[in-house]
Amino acid sequence: MSVQPLAASEVPYFERIVADSDLDGLCGAAVLKAFRPSAEVIFSHAAAIRSGQIDEMIDRKTVLVDLPFHPNCGWYVDHHLTNRPSQGESELFNNEGGTSHWEATPSAASLAYDLLREVVDMSHLSEMMPIVDALDSGGITKEEFIEDGPVIQFARTCTPREPEYMQQVVQLLSGGMRLEELLAHPIVQPHLLRVQKERKIAEEHIAKHTQIHDRLAICRLDETPLRINGYLVTAWAGDAVDACCIVHGFEDGSLDTPERPALSASFYANSFLKNGQGRFDLSRLATALDPTGGGHANACGCRIQPPGIDSNLKHWLSMWANRETELRIK
C-alpha cells in the first residue's frame, strides 16, 4: 500500500526530532528537519528508548523516527516489525493527541519522505531514498557491496560514536545539500577514509573470529572497537549460511558510552542468497532473552543478558536448531 502524503495542516507540530543513530535515522531526521529547520535533533538508539534512558527528552512536541514506540511522543514514524504499537496502544495514543504513522516501508526515512513530499521541497534528498531503502532492507547486491562505493562507505560513517559528525551531516542534508556534494564535503571525506581502513581490518578479523554452526555464522567482535554489519559477514560466508549473529561491545560497556557500548548481538539474514530474506523471523532470537531487543525479521539486535555470552549463544543456537518450527515465517 502506498503512503498517503500529508497536507500541511495535517503535519503534527514538533520542536524536537529523536532519531536512530544510523543512516536511516539520519536521513529520516534530515527529512523532518527540512520541513521544520528550527527543530532540535537528538540521535539515540532502540535500547535507550526501551529502557527509559531518555524519557525526559520525549514529549508531545517530539517526533520519534526509526525507533521503538514511546507513548509520550507527539508523532511516531517507523517501519520496524517489533516496534509497531498494538491496536490498543495506537488507540490510546491517538485519543490522547498523538499521531502514529507505522508502515512496513523499506526504511523509516522513505516513510517520512513520502508523508511530507507534498508540503516541502525535498528534491535534493530524492536520490538518497532508494539507496537508504536498499541498505536498510537488504536490497544491496553482493557485487555492489564488494565494490564498496562511496555511498555504502558513507552509510558506515553514521554511528552513535560520531555524534558531532551526525549533527553536521543532518544540518547539511536538511539545508539542501545533494548526495554528490555531501560525499565530497570536507566534513565527510575524513570519515570515508576512516571506514575504508576499518573495513580492511574488519575483513581480517572476520576470517579469524567467525565460526559457522548449522548455517549460522557467529562472528565475535566483543572486546574490540570494531563494528561490522551483516553484509560483510554474509559476503565472507557466502552460500554456506542462511544468517549471521554478530557479538559486539564490551563487558564493562554501557548505554551511556557510545565509544564503549554494552555487550550486544545483531542478527542478519543472508540477503545475498536467492530468497535469502523472509525465511526466518530473526527478531524472535533478539527478543528471546532481552525485553529491549527487536528490529526487523531480517535484521535485528539485542543486549547480552546474564549470565553472559556463552549462555546467550547456547540459547540462540538451540532456537536456531529448531528454526523450521520456531523461526520459520509462514
Image (cartoon, rainbow, N blue to C red):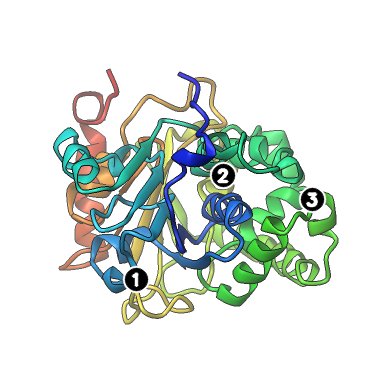
Q: Earlier in the sequence, mark 3 or mark 1?
A: 1
Nearest the viewer among 245 and 90 is: 90
Q: Closer to us: mark 3 or mark 1?
A: 1
Up-down: is 36 above or below 321? Answer: below
Q: Based on the displayed image, in which of its 4 quarters is residue 77 positioned?
A: top left
Helix, strand or loop status at disc 1: helix
Q: x and y percent of residue 246 in the render? A: 42, 55
Identify the mark at residue 49; answer none if there is no mark: none
Q: Closer to us: mark 2 or mark 3?
A: 3
Q: Quadrant of the N terminus?
A: top left
According to the image, label 2 marks what residue? 231
According to the image, label 3 marks what residue? 178
Q: x and y percent of residue 298 in the render? A: 41, 36
Give the residue drawn at x 43%, y 32%.
242
Up-down: is 4 above or below 220? Answer: above
> Is the residue marked by circle 2 packed among few (<14), some (14-19), or many (20+) residues within 10 Å?
many
Which residue type does callout 3 highlight?
A: Arg
Q: CA distance from mark 1 to mark 2?
A: 33 Å
Helix, strand or loop status at disc 2: helix
Q: x and y percent of residue 98 in the render? A: 29, 47
Q: CA distance from mark 3 to mark 1?
A: 30 Å
Which residue type does callout 2 highlight?
A: Tyr
According to the image, label 1 marks what residue? 57
Give the residue drawn at x 20%, y 48%.
96
Nearest the viewer among 90 and 43 is: 90
Q: Earlier in the sequence, mark 1 or mark 2?
A: 1
Give the residue drawn at x 34%, y 72%.
262
